[in-house]
Image: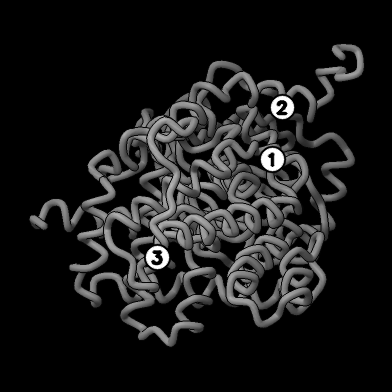
Amino acid sequence: MNKATYDNHVQILREELVCALGCTEPIAVAYAAALARAALPAAPEHLHVACSGNIIKNVKSVTVPNSGGMRGIEAAATLGAVGGDPTRDLEVLQSVGVDDIDRTRELVNGGFCDVELAEDVPNLYVRVVATGAGHTSVACIEERHTNVTELALDGRPTTAAGRSASGEKGEASGSGADRSQLSLQSIWDFAHEVRLEDVDELVSNQIDTNQAISREGLTHRWGANIGSTLLKSRPNDISCKARAAAAAGSDARMSGCAMPVVINCGSGNQGITCSQPVLEYAHDLWSSHEELVRAVVLSDLTAVHVKYFIGELSAFCGAVSASCGAGAGICMLRGGSFGQFEATIVNTLANVGGIVCDGAKPSCAAKICAAVDAAILGCDMALSDDNFLAGDGLVGANAEETIRSMGYVGRVGMHPTDVEILNIMIGKRDVDADA
């Protein structure tokens, strides 16, 4: 692998594997509001938040961390403006205190914040307008959760909390790495050739951080308790333990657990799914630390590659792309070949490709469970050379073609589905009247 390609793979991992507190969509709203507040020379008297449909969908039903159980865009934005620390990026709500929560609840009930659906904008779009003492500030995030494309005070560009509108609009905005250069072959080669010192700290932090919230989800009652329910049913089955470890982390974070997660593809659920099933198999197989790290590297980059063709937010559940990564990492730990690595991905997509995303909420943990189960089956099939073949539905001539076909369905084919899911969720579609 040449140096430029190698460095690009390392940079992708550095950009993707960052810490976030809570579901990243309400956190993006809180972050934009905190930036707008920091740009304003006085306490804001009102917030106006314009969001894409996918942001509204993913914030509606999830608990905002450190909020005392509040949900919704109004709560996320107000809490970010009242007590958020924009210098901490996706951990913006880490420092929120009890007084901030009480003040937020009072302001939300008093109509401090109003929300608008933004049309003809990127799938990930948040624009916060804060007004106070005769001034108006604006903070806008597009495409990626911390990509600030607008930061202004009274119509002029400004700097706040050490940030300015440095991001650029576009598909790869806010990113220095080129994800379009990834391929399954390059990912496989990189995972085998990477110098451990270049990725060990980054990936080990992902494993340890996500293991902590997974254990929290298994130990205490969070959400629908998918992880702990799974583990009670078959506590000694490795495939069950792998699914439970990933689901439990989602149980906790979807219900407001104030523990950080290392994300991937802009999602904590996906970061957990990429790492924790692989960790469980590494324990079961007595794999070395180096083998574990290399397998998680393969998992992370595979997920990024599959997700690249779908887009940042869509009607296609991101647990599917992340589970492709988990299956790939497990395949590597189990001694699979490059061809079996490819087959694992194809088998997974042929099974659960197209699970719909109806927003962030407790049932995400169940979808993670289903997707990881499909990935483990896909790996078992690959290692037995019993695979889905070209022409089986969307399965293409090879793994790359299958990834692109499934990505097209998620990005383009499911766009009308995304619109209708949002319409139902916000009450604009009467499904009984349309029956």
Q: Amino acid at mark 1?
A: Gly
Say which label, 2 or 3, has the lower sequence index: 3
Q: Amino acid at mark 3?
A: Cys
Q: Judging from the image, what secondary structure is the residue with disc 1 in?
A: loop
Q: Which mark is residue 65?
A: none
Q: Nearer the viewer, residue 17 or 333?
A: 333
Q: Judging from the image, what secondary structure is the residue with disc 3 in?
A: helix
Q: Badge 1 is on which residue?
A: 359
Name the quadrant containing residue 165: top left
Within-10-Å neighbours for mark 3: few <14, some 14–19, many 20+: many
Say which label, 1 or 2, has the lower sequence index: 1
The structure residue drawn at horizontal position 69% and vertical position 40%, both measured from the top left corner, is 359
Q: Residue furthest top?
A: 434
Q: Position of residue 321 (x, y in %)?
A: 48, 47
Say which label, 3 or 1, has the lower sequence index: 3
Within-10-Å neighbours for mark 1: few <14, some 14–19, many 20+: many
Residue 216 in sight: yes
Please state if 177 lies on the left or on the right of 169 as rendered. left
The structure residue drawn at horizontal position 35% and vertical position 76%, both measured from the top left corner, is 201
Within-10-Å neighbours for mark 2: few <14, some 14–19, many 20+: many
Q: Position of residue 78 (x, y in %)?
A: 72, 45
Alpha carbon distance from label 1 to label 2:
9 Å
**Circles 1 and 2 in contact, beta carbons < 8 Å:** no
Residue 85 in sight: no
**Circles 2 and 3 in contact, beta carbons < 8 Å:** no
Q: Badge 2 is on which residue?
A: 422
